[in-house]
Amino acid sequence: MTAEQALYIPPYKADDPDVVGELTARFGEQTLTLQGTRTGMPVVWVPREKLIEVLSFLRGLPRPYVMLYDLHGVDERLRTHRQGLPAADFSVFYHLMSLERNSDVMIKVALSEGQMNLPTASNIWPNANWYEREVWDMYGITFDGHPHLTRLLMPPTWEGHPLRKDYPARATEFDPYTLTAAKQDQEQEALRFEPSKWGMKQHKEHEDFMFLNLGPNHPSAHGAFRIVLQLDGEEIVDCVPEIGYHHRGAEKMAERQSWHSFIPYTDRIDYLGGVMNNLPYVLSVEKLAGITVPARVDVIRIMMAEFFRILNHLLYLGTYIQDVGAMTPVFFTFTDRQRAYKVVEAITGFRLHPAWYRIGGVAHDLPRGWDKLVKEFIDWMPKRLDEYEKAALQNSILKGRTQGVAAYNSKEALEWGITGAGLRATGVDFDLRKARPYSGYENFEFEVPLAANGDAYDRCMVKMGEMRQSLRIIEQCLKNMPEGPYKADHPLTTPPPKERTLQHIETLITHFLQVSWGPVMPANESFQMIEATKGINSYYLTSDGGTMSYRTRIRTPSFAHLQQIPAVIRGSMIPDLIAYLGSIDFVMADVDR
C-alpha cells in the first residue's frame, strides 16, 4: 500500500455493535456469551471448538480485523465476580483491531484445568507466534500446531508458570537461591543455540553456514537482547531473536501492589517514556473508578507526555545516527535532552522516572515559573531539529546506509502488529491521538507525519516530524493552560488533596486507608491504549472488587516490533541489521516487562 492508496480511517467507534451482529448472524446467539465491561469494545466468549472458525471469520470479513493487537491469558480460579460468564479455570483472550472500522473486538475462550490446550492462531496472524509462546510460558496453556512452542521470557530450565495464581509472587516465598558450579554449567549449556531445533540447516551442498551470536551484550543490540544469525558469508539467511534477559515480572507485581502504589512500576516499562507510561494505566484505573478529571489535568498530562516523546526521540535520533557510523550527533542530542529534563525536573521534582500522574490527577500543581522554562525550550528546539536534519539526516552516507534497508509494506506491518512510526512510515495514517483521541487531544492542532517506503530512513524521518508536532502541542498547552484543580473531587482519587486532609477527619481517614491499603475499585474490566513513544501501549485491567488488580495486562509496542525482525531482514547484510535495529526504537524493558 502506498501513501496514495492510503486507508481511510473512520471516526472511532467504541463498543461497536456491528461486529456482534455479524458474529450472531454467522454463529448463532446460543454460541456466544457477551460480557459487559468498561474496555470500550465488545467482549465475546466463544466455545473452544469454534475459536479458529470465529477468528478466521473476523480476519476475512469485508472490513477485516486486520491486526491481532494482543493475545494473553488469565488464571480465573480465584476470581469471585464471574456472574454470567462461562465456567473457566483459565481463559485466553484475543484482542483484534480493525482499521477500516476503527474499532476493536475481544474474543475470549474458557479452559478447564483438564484441557489446557487450544489450536494455534499463527496461521491466521503470524504475530500470534510469540504471544502464544508467552501464554504457554506464563500459564502452561499449549497451542496445538504452533511452530515452536518453547519458553520465551523465562530461561529454558525454568520450572512452573509464573502468572498462575498458585505461583509465588515474592522472593521470600521461595527457598534461598543457590548457584552451584554444576548448576551454572547446566544453565550455560541450556543457552547454547541448536539450529536443528529451529529447523535450520547447518550446511548446503558445498559449504557450511556460520551461526553468529549478536548480543545479549552488544552496543548495537540496544539492551540485553540476543539475536542468533544464520550467515552465508555476510548475508543473513535467517535469524532467531531471543528476549527475556530483562524480564522482571511487572504483570505479576501488579497483583500484589495497590492500584495507587503500582504507578512507579509503570515508569519502568518503557524506561525512556517517563510519565507517558503512567498515562494508559491511570486512564484505565479512572475508567474502573468512574472518575472524570478536570480540564487542567488533561492539559498538564498531555504537555508532560509530549515532553517525554521529545526526550525519547532525541535519544533515538542520536543512537540511530551513531549505529550507522556518525559519532558526534549523540552528544548534541543528549545536550538537548538535558534542557528538556530541566523542565521535567522543575515541574515534577524528578527526571527519568517521575511517576507523577495520580489516579484522578497529578501529584501537585504546576510550580511558579513553569511557563518561562517551557517557553525557553520550545524557542530553542526547532532550530536544533533543523541542524540535525541538515547535518546528519541529509548526509549521503547515512542515506546510503538506510534508504531501501529493512523495508516492509502496510500489509506486513499490520499482520505483525506494528504500530507507531513503524506503521506510519508505510503510509498508514493511524495515530491514536487523532484516530481515537484521549485526554483531550481532540482539542489540539497538529499533524501526523507519514512516509511511504517503510524503510530504516523513513522510520527516522517520521520520528523527526513527530518531535516538531510535539513542540506544537506543548506550545498550545503553554498558551491555553486552563485554570482549576489538579485533581478530581472523587473519593477514589489518590491521595486526596493535602489541604483537605488537614481540615476534615473523614478525608484524613480516607488518605490513611488509600495510602496504606489502597483504594477499592469496583469489580469490572477496563482498557486504555495510548500513542506512546514507540507505538501503541495499553493497560488491560481486571478488578475483582479489591485494593489490588486481579490481572494487569501490559501490551507494549516493542514486543511486536522485535518479533517481526526475521521476516524483514532475511537476505540482507549484517550492517543492514544494525541499521534496522537502530531504526525500530526499542528498549528491552518495554519488550520483556
Image (cartoon, rainbow, N blue to C red):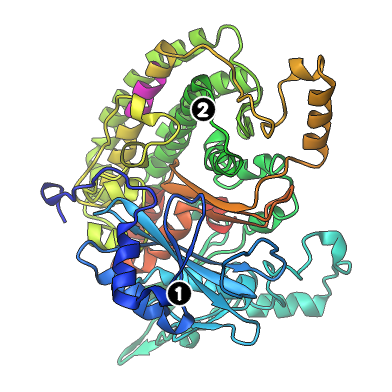
Q: Which residue is drawn at 57% across and 43% down?
A: 281
Element assignment for label 2:
helix
Tell me residue 434's x, y (percent).
Answer: 31, 37
Where 578 sits versus 518, above or below? below
Q: Give the range drawn in magenta.
A: 468-475
Camera sees residue 409: no
Disc 2 to disc 1, C-alpha distance? 39 Å
Q: How crowded is mark 2: few (under 14 residues within 10 Å), some or many (20 or more)?
A: many
Tell me residue 413's x, y (percent).
30, 59
- Looking at numbered disc 1 in the image, what kind of residue is underneath it? Val
Asked whether residue 16 is drawn in magenta, I would say no
Quick one: quadrant of the C terminus? bottom right
Q: What element carries label 1?
A: loop
Marking on residue 46: 1
Q: In which quarter of the image is the N terminus?
A: bottom left
**Vertical relation: 215 (above or below) 359:** below
Question: In this figure, which residue is indicated by the disc labeled 2?
Answer: 301
**Residue 286 image offset from top left, x and y in percent:** 58, 38
Residue appearing at x 45%, y 41% in the figure: 532
Is residue 472 on the magenta stretch? yes
Can you see residue 80?
yes
The image's mark for residue 188 is none
Q: Which of marks 2 and 1 is nearer the N terminus?
A: 1
Instruction: Name the residue at the bottom extreme.
Output: 205
> Considering depth in this image, is 402 or 414 the residue closer to the camera?
414
